[in-house]
Amino acid sequence: MLIWRPDHRPTSEGGRARAAARLALGLLLLALALFALALISLATGARAIPLENVWAALVAFDPNATEHRIVWDLRLPRTIVGLMVGAALGLAGAVLQGATRNPLADPSILGIHAGASLAVVLGVALLGMTQLSSYVWLAFAGAGLSMLVVYSVASVGRDGATPVKLALAGAAITAVLYAIINAILLTSPRTLDEVRFWQVGSLSGRTVDIALQVAPFLLIGALLALATARLLDGLSMGDDVARAIGQRVGLSRGLAGLAAVVLAGASTAAAGPIAFVGLTVPHVARAIAGPSYRWILPYSMLLAPILLLGADVIGRVIATPGEVQVGIVTAFLGAPVFMALVRRRKLAAL
Amino acid sequence: MSMATYAGRIRTLRHAAASRRRSTSLALLTALGAAFALALYLGDYPIPPLAVVQSLFSPLTGLTDRSVDFIVLQVRLPRAVLALLSGASFGLAGIIFQTLLRNPLASPDIIGIAHGASAAAVFCIIILGWTALAVSVGAFLGAILTALAIYLLAWRDGVTAFRVVLIGIGMAAMLAAAISYLFTRARLNEVQQAMAWLVGSLNAARPEDCIVLGGAMLVLVPLLIGLVRGLDAMELGDDTARALGATVERSRLGLMLVAVGFAAFATAAVGPVGFVAFVSGPLARYLLKGTGRGFPQAALVGALVMLVSDLIAQHMLPAVQLPVGVVTGACGALFLLWLLMSSGRSGRIN
C-alpha cells in the first residue's frame, strides 16, 4: 500500500524558476501556433489562397489583385474578430470559474449570454433590427444589465456574494430571461427565423466595423482580467483564508465579475453566444499550468483563440463553398478533445 | 457541562429538526392541494365546485353528467395529475444529481441529460418527420443513451463526481450544437414545431401519459428509498465514503439510474420543461434550513412549481395558452431569487 507519495512539485527556489521558465516557453509556443493558425485562416475559404500570396497581400497590398482584396476585406476582419473573441471567452471563463470557485461557471450560466440574447431578440422583435452591427450594442447592454442584476441579487444578505449564491442567482436570471426569449420566439416566427442564425455563434460576415466597435472593451476587459490573477489565487483558498491574509473578498469578486462581463459581453456582441469555449478551456489551461491563475489566465487567453480559430477554419473547409458556423464546430471538435482530457489527465477540482 | 445536558441538547435539536421537516412538508402539501383543486376548478367552461367533486366520484356513485365528466375527468384531471407527477419526477431527478455530484448547478438540465432528450426529439421532428408519441419515445431513448454515454466516458477505475460533471457539460455542449445545427438547416415551420417541443407543454396531456409516468414512479420511488441510505456516507466525499466502507460505486450507479429514469420518463411525457429539476433541490433545502436532505420536499416543490406554472400558463393571458415551460423558468426562478434575497445566510444549499 502506498502511504507516502513523494511530492514532485518544486520547492526549491531554482526548481520554481525552472518551472516558470518552462511555462513561459509553453506560452511562447502557443503564441507561435496561434500566429500560424491565423495565417492559415487567411488562406482558407471558398477560394483557397496560397500562403505566399497571403503573405504578399499582408506586406505589399495591391488593391487590384482579387486575392489581396479577399484577404484584407473578408478574411482579415474575420480572423481578427476570431482572435479577439477567442481570447476574451477564454479569459472570461477562467475569471468566472476562479471568482465563483465552480467548474461549471461560464458566461452562459451566469446570465451573460441570456442577457445579450434577450436584448437582441427584443431588438429584432420590437425594433425590426436585422443588421449584425446593430446587434453589437444591444448584446453588450443586455449582457451588462443581466450580470449587474445577477451580482446585486447575489450580494443581498449578510455574507455578500458567495460562490453558491452567485451561481444560483446566475442560473435563476438565465432561466427568467430564457422564459421571455422563448415566449417571444414561439409567438414571432419572423424573430425566430432571424435569431436562429445569430444564436449559433458565428464569425461569418464580421467586418472591420464590428472589430473596431468591440476592440476597446476587449482590451480593457483583458487588462482587468489579467490584473485580477493574484486576487483569484487568494479566493481559491476559500473566502475565510483570503480574508485572513487581508484580501477584500467582495471587492475581488466584483472586479473579476466586471472583467468577465466586459469580455463576455463584447465577445457575444461580436460573434453571438458561444458557450463551450469559456467553460472548458480554463480546465485545459489548469491541467497544463497548475493551480495559479497567474498562469491559468494567459494560457486560457492563448488556448481559447486556437480552439475558436481552428474550429472556424475547419468549419470553412468541411462545407466548401458554404460553411458550418464556428459555434457548432467548436462544440463538436472541442467536446471530444475535452472529454478525452478529462479522462486521461487528472483535471484539478476547484 | 455534563454528558446528560449534551444528550438532552442533542435530543432537543433533533426534535426541532424533525418538526421543521414535518411543518415544511405539511405547508407544501397544503399548497399543493390548493393548487390541485384550483386546477380542477378553473377553465373556460365554468363548472361549480360541487359538480367538480360529484364528477370526480362519478365512477363510484354512478351520478353522471356527460359533458362535465368529460371536461373534469378527461381534460382537467389528467392535466393536473400529469403536472403533479412530472413536477415531482423532475424535482427528484434534480436533487439526486445535485446531491450525488455535490454541486448545486449539476441538475440534469445542465449536465447533458435533458440535452440528450432534446437533441433526439429535434432529430425525430426535423429529420425523421415524426410527431407526438414517437417523439416522446425518441426523447426517452435519447436521455437514457446520453446518461449511459456520460457514465461510460467518465468511468476510469470508478467514477468521480467531478469527472461526471465535466464529461456531462462536454456532452451537453455537443448536443446543444447539434440542435443549433439542425435549427439552421431546417425549414422554419419544422423549427417552430421543434421549438414548441423543447419548451415543454402540458397542453396535450392524456390519461395514458399519467399511467405511464405514474407506473414508472411506482417502481422508481421504492428503489430510491432503498438506495438513499448510502448517501450520508457519500456526501462526505468519495475517499471518506470508501474509508467508511460504503459501497460507493454501486450505490452511486443505482442512484444515478433512478435519477435518469425520473428525468427520462418525465421528459418523454411533457418535454424538457426547464428549471424544475434545477430549482426544486435548492428551494427545498432553503425551506428546511439545513435540517434534512430534502428529497421528499424537493418532489413536493417540483410538483408545486409545475402545477402553479401550468395554472399561470393557462389563465394569465385570456386569448393565448402559453406552454408551461415558458412559465416554469420564470416562476421557479423568481421563487429562488426571492429566497436568495430574503435569507441572510447562504451555504445551506450544497
Image (tube, coloured by chain):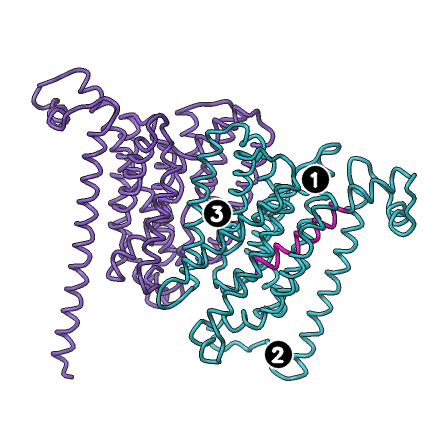
Chain colours: A cyan, B purple
Q: What amino acid does circle 1 point to?
A: Ser
Callout 1 secondary element: loop
Quadrant of the image occupied by residue B292? bottom left
Of helix, strand and loop, which mostly describes the magenta segment? Answer: helix
Task: Identify which residue, B181 or A234, lies in the foreground.
Answer: A234
Could you classify mark 3 by the number of other residues whose Cα lies within 10 Å: few (under 14), some (14-19), or many (20 or more)?
Answer: many
Name the chain under label 3. B
Name the chain under label 2. A
B162 with respect to A6 (left or right):
left
Q: Is residue B250 visible?
A: no
* Residue at the image point whose x is 28% and y is 39% from the top: B308
Q: Is A57 above or below relative to B162?
A: above
Residue that badge 1 annotates: A204
Q: CA distance from mark 2 to mark 3?
A: 36 Å
B289 with respect to A305 (left or right):
left
Same chain under badges 1 and 3? The reply is: no
Looking at the rendered image, the disc whose residue lies closer to the viewer, 1 or 2, is 1
* Residue at the image point whose x is 39% and y is 43% from the top: B329
Task: Identify which residue, A30 or A133, lies in the foreground.
Answer: A133
* Residue at the image point whose x is 11% and y is 79% from the top: B4
Q: Which of the labelled discs sits on residue A10, or is there none?
A: 2
Could you classify mark 2 by the number of other residues whose Cα lies within 10 Å: few (under 14), some (14-19), or many (20 or more)?
Answer: few
Q: Are marks 1 and 3 in contact (CB under 8 Å)?
A: no
| First of labels 1, 2 by sequence position | 2
Q: Position of residue B216 (x, y in %)?
A: 29, 36
Callout 2 secondary element: loop
Residue that badge 3 annotates: B150
Q: Which residues are magenta?
A: A77-94
Q: What amino acid does circle 3 point to?
A: Ile
B164 with respect to A49 (left or right):
left
Q: Position of residue A65 (x, y in %)?
A: 91, 39
Q: Position of residue A4 (x, y in %)?
A: 49, 78
